[in-house]
Amino acid sequence: MKTVFDRPAALTDVPLHYCPGCTHGIVHRLVAEVIDELGVEGKTVGIAPVGCAVFAYNYFNCDMIEAAHGRAPAVATGVKRTHPECVVFTYQGDGDLAAIGTAETVHSATRGENITIIFINNCIYGMTGGQMAPTTLPGQVTTTTPYGRKRNIQGSPVRVCEMLSTLDGVALAARVSVDCPKNVMNAKAMIKKAFQNQLDGKGFSIVEVLSTCPTNWGMTPRDALQWLRDNMIPYYPLGIYKDSAAIRDPEETQEAGK
Amino acid sequence: MAKKVLMKGNEAIAEAAIASGCLYYFGYPITPQTEISEYLAKRMPKVGGLCLQAESEIAAVNMLLGAASAGSRAMTSSSSPGISLKSEGISYIAGSDLPCLVVNVQRGGPGLGGIQPSQSDYYQATRGVGHGDLRLIVVAPSSVQEMASLTSLAFDLADTYRMPAMLLADGALGQMMEPVDFGAFEKRELPEKTWATNGHGFKRKRNIINSLYIDPKELEDSVIARYKRYAEVEETEVRCEKYMTDDADIIITAFGITSRIAKSAIAEARKSGIKAGLLRPITLWPFPKKELNELADTAKVFLSVEMSMGQMVDDVRLAVNGKRPVHFFGRTGGIIPSVDEVYAEIKKLSEVI
């Protein structure tokens, strides 16, 4: 009998701890499918820092590192610069990547680190129970913005892909969504491109994935997907913000000693 | 005869790192240790290594964590305020059982403090560098030669016990020049890094580098297992120098640059017929507890001399354990105690014993 659907080999056979309706599961699967399709599990090192995906080391079959909050791009730099033959990816949430880890994000991007970043934007801190994130939308109610995020008090959300697309070191900055099958397919294509870029030595590639957090948004999974479409996509338009065709000059390779 | 080179202490650390097979350095400029980065920026490309200037101390220590996770021999260096920033990463490194070297060329504190030499990070190095139950191996050089040889030793101890090591120097040692021999390092057999995350290649089970244990029992077990290793370090890796202690009534305890001042003061004291001697801890952790406690059977009084308001003196008191009185003399804020000052303290004690 022909197998038409199976667990990707790069995913371990354990139940995920994520809440019902959370889209982390979809994104984990997409990353694992890409690792399988590129045949790179044996040389891949994944890095998951603090956030809902902190237990990602239980879910991927490649070597994994659990990093401090916000520091994954620096840890990835240390792995990739000393082991350029490895495929290195980070899997980070919005608080991690765009608040506490902003410096690590921006500087790994501007150095053009040849790594792949999967960035989960769900407009909220999930793990700690629904506090304001740097990506929380204006007016959005969270446990630390009980009257809604106000621009004059908490400021405005950070648009990560737009910001990073101004940096020379960035090969790919793309925003995708996993709210419907068509967007999920597109998200996979972008994630694959972000990994392929690394194999081609193009440099820093980031895929921002608009995701839902039904538990902390206080919605059903279905309403959460609709909320993403109605509120997140208008503020965070989907698309490719930077796609550099250039393959890095071999003279500028980051391998130590070259 | 081995060839000696005249070098700055900071440069000696850098060259010794390369001589010890460390090809990866991650740093951020801060006085008085910046020569380490500058030296390695020149040297690393010539030996196929990497010297990377990070965006912050925090990023540098996490790059170090990544490099160490992948099984590479790697280091970072900084000075006091920068070590405070690195302490988060050091805690993660300790909790993830990763070997690496962190160099602290101390300056005065707290806060921005000053840029002159100090030993006021003793507590930080031996007690509180990062949150949680953890230890670092801490070595304290007192010469430019030891800046080199203890760098090499610290790397090996870190690898042997799979834990971070710190070389605790100060601005004086970092800046002064003395002859160094890079061929004189002790060598030891090192364990293979089978735990490294550098791609399983379908040849082994996946490796995970992690410091998170949600189940308290698992966390307790992991800490207890680590403390068993720490106990082994305390049992086997204590290093100290004894100078004229056999017949000494007064034992000075001092480490690093201060121990050299103490030696001169002891020579003065001996000239005046005062029987003084020195115990210099070379490893600050593990601390030479046993050696000090034994000296308390023969000596009458102890004097800890430090460039701080009195930090190591706590460990001296714990080691002497009430057998003899323990006194303290120190200067702080970047002031180096003079031989005369230390001699005066010894003289004072000699009059009351």
Image (tube, coloured by chain):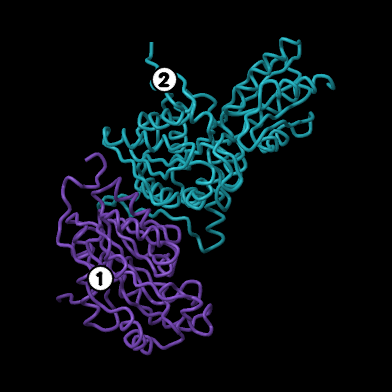
Chain colours: A purple, B cyan
- The nearer-to-camera label among 1 and 2 is 2
- Residue nearer the viewer, A186 or B157: A186
> Is label 1 on the same chain as label 2?
no
- Classify mark 2: helix, strand or loop: strand
The residue sitting at 38% across, 49% down in the picture is B54
> In the rendered image, which residue does mark 2 sit on?
B6
Q: Tag 1: residue type?
A: Ala
What x and y, as percent, mark residue B153?
A: 46, 30
What x and y, as percent, mark residue B265?
A: 68, 18
What x and y, as percent, mark residue B76?
A: 42, 42
The residue sitting at 50% across, 72% down in the picture is A128
Q: Tag 2: residue type?
A: Leu
Question: Where, by quadrant of the figure, is residue A93 drawn?
Answer: bottom left
The residue sitting at 38% across, 72% down in the picture is A158
Q: Is residue B164 above or below residue A62?
A: above
- Classify mark 1: helix, strand or loop: strand
Side (left or right) of B207 relative to B169: left
- Residue nearer the viewer, B322 or A206: A206
